Image (spheres, rainbow, N blue to C red):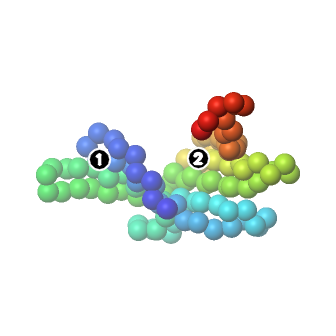
Amino acid sequence: MKVVFPLPRGNATVILRPGFDELGRFILVSSGAGFGDAGFYRVLEIDDEHMRVKNLRSLCERFTLFTDDEGTLRCDHSVRYLGMTMLRLHYKMRILRPAPGRDR
């Protein structure tokens, strides 16, 4: 999976590798062995004809998707930089139902 975030004079591109963890949960991980693998890339426009791309291997994201005991879809999202957890988020996703008497 590829996600692109626009930035001045370029973008940040994150390539996520799908897989499964030891519990069988679906995961997306942005770490790879080298350039071209899953990872975080900073793309910088040098001029109209040249770009510079840097693979920041010290930055890694991980998404773990699963359903809880009540069947609710959840996601644990962590961002590590230089081996330290910099951000940890938890998402809860559910179907939004219209209020009684209202159409969708």
| Residue at x 49% of width, y 62% of height | 1
Q: Is residue 82 visible?
A: no
> Vertically, is 61 above or below 20?
above
Image location of residue 54, percent across then percent down: 36, 56
| Residue at x 76% of width, y 48% of height | 72
Image location of residue 95, percent across then percent down: 68, 44
| Residue at x 59% of width, y 48% of height | 80
Q: Quadrant of residue 88?
A: top right
Which numbered dot is residue 39? none
In the image, 29: left or right of 72?
Answer: left
In the image, 43: left or right of 13?
Answer: left
| Residue at x 23% of width, y 56% of height | 51
In the image, 93: left or right of 51?
Answer: right
The C terminus - image quarter: top right
Distance CA(mark 1)–CA(mark 2): 22 Å
Considering the numbered disc 2 on the image, is that residue within a helix, a strand or a loop? strand
Identity of the amino acid at label 2? Val
How many marks on residues? 2
Identity of the amino acid at label 1? Gly
Which numbered dot is residue 79? 2
Image location of residue 84, percent across then percent down: 62, 46
Residue denoted by label 1: 10
Q: Are marks 1 and 2 in contact (CB under 8 Å)?
A: no
Classify mark 1: residues with Cα within 10 Å, few (<14), some (14-19) or many (20+). Answer: some
> Vertically, is 90 above or below 27?
above
Q: Quadrant of residue 56?
A: bottom left
Q: Could you say which is closer to the camera, residue 54 or residue 76?
A: 76
**The residue positioned farthest toward the right in the image shown:** 69
Q: Reading the chain from its start, which is encountered first: label 1 or label 2?
A: 1
Q: Could you say which is closer to the camera, residue 104 or residue 93?
A: 104
Considering the numbered disc 1 on the image, is that residue within a helix, a strand or a loop? strand
